[in-house]
Image: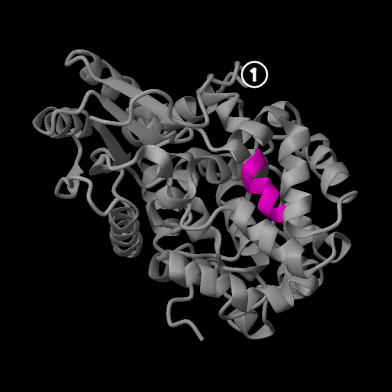
Amino acid sequence: MLTDPYPSTRSEALARLEEFLPTAGSYGRDRNAVLPGHPNVSRLSAALRSRLITEEEVLRRVLSLHPFPAVEKFVQEVVWRTYWKGWLELRPQVWTTYRERVVWLRQNAPEPVLRRAEEVAAGRSGVAVMDRFARELLTTGYLHNHARMWWASFWIHVERLPWELGADFFFRHLLDADPASNTLSWRWVAGLQTPGKVYLVRRSNLERFAPPSWLDDATGLGRLDDSRIEPASVEEQADTKVRPLPVMVERPHGEVDSTGLWLHDDDGLIELSPLRHLGNPTLISAWIEPGPGDESGPVVLAWKARARSDAWRRACVQFPTGRRETLLDTRTVSAALVDALVSNGCRRLAALAPPVGPISDQVGEIRRCLAGRGIDLILIRRPWDSALWPWASRGFFPFWERVRARLGSTAEGDDAINALLQRAS
């Protein structure tokens, strides 16, 4: 039995996957039950978010042991993560607008709104079961997806607080705080992601899927009575028009000498990526931290520290004779990268492409700083992402039907995933 319920190293993530595999067939039946310890879900979301393990790996393993119909719901939920990322890659302005709104609200929202948001986030809303969830998030860095939906709906449709501030609270405290999954899920609960559809928290739903003991303290529970919940009016702030997916390569080309390899939080699996072919690059680990006022919670920071150390260790094993830079932990990552590359005589910097989010936000500045010193930036997109992201131009279910049609008609395991990638490309 693993001691860490939310694996922060690759070996722990692989072990957790093996623990989960025997129960994957019952996932569709049991996943909505919110139970102590969350035994009915994989608890791999943080490892997947930082790519200590990949979606492709998980599905290859699951489909090697179970026929597709038996695990279809689990496969679908894993693919949701790919869909969300693809959706945001095609509409990066939605992320930008959301982050701008967080800053604006912090500076301009009425003081009573900001004060109430702080109270609810601290677990002092006065609705005992919702305060329980807030405290669980703050102390563990995790919430069951069903509880996330309940709590987000409570924030938006009961407390009538700005969804952007709630999404930012989750983003700072979730171990699996994925820019796409988190932002777009909050938009969905608010009624923005699928126009005309909102998610409303219901007392009857909590009574069905949460342990009865969690509702023993009925303080404030009447606020969640089914008949009392009405959707809040939420205005669309973002332009959701599809943009062309930026063109990127899937493997490095040309010389491999004098190349620096940049490790970052969005992908910690260099040894199972196209960058494993680089030879012996200069290893540079530059961890981009959020800006002032956006700091992650202490549980998240501790988890990231373990995941970063693990990614660095594995990269050093992959490139045993390559030069190595001391880990960089800096807010001025562009300058730090330039200094490290110049001091090591590098003419190129290669990295796995960060998806839309805080790291990607700095790529433009990094590229400009590198160009000023005659250094090229090469971003590599994984084949899984290149194959599936373009399908995310519409809603999830058209996307899923394309995936399902390919997986469901193929034998199992590697054959199924290989067929998906070949037919998608």
Tell me, yes or no, if residue 19 can be seen here: yes
Q: Residue at x 22, y 50 (%)?
A: 321
* Crowd class of label 1 (few under 14; some 14 to 19; many from 20; radius 10 Å): some
| Left or right, 308 with reference to 113 | left
Of residues 267 and 240, the one drawn nearer to the viewer in this rendering: 267
| 361 to 303, vertically: above or below | above
Q: Position of residue 167 (x, y in %)?
A: 49, 45
Residue 193, quarter of the rendered image: top right
Residue 255, quarter of the rendered image: top left
Of residues 80 and 230, the one drawn nearer to the viewer in this rendering: 80
Instruction: Give the residue pinned by disc 1.
Output: 242
Considering every residue shown, the one lying at the far left of the view is: 343
Query: Which quadrant: the C terminus?
Result: top right
Q: Residue at x 30, y 39 (%)?
A: 262
Q: Amino acid at mark 1?
A: Val
Of residues 402 and 126, the one drawn nearer to the viewer in this rendering: 402
Residue 72, quarter of the rendered image: bottom right
Main structural element of the magenta stretch: helix, strand or loop?
Answer: helix
Q: Position of residue 194 (x, y in %)?
A: 73, 34
Q: Residue at x 68, y 57 (%)?
A: 59
Magenta-drawn stretch contains 173 = no
Q: Tag 1's secondary structure?
A: loop
Question: Residues in magenta?
Answer: 77-83
Of residues 386 and 118, the one drawn nearer to the viewer in this rendering: 386
| 127 to 2, vertically: above or below | above
Q: Position of residue 15 (x, y in %)?
A: 53, 74
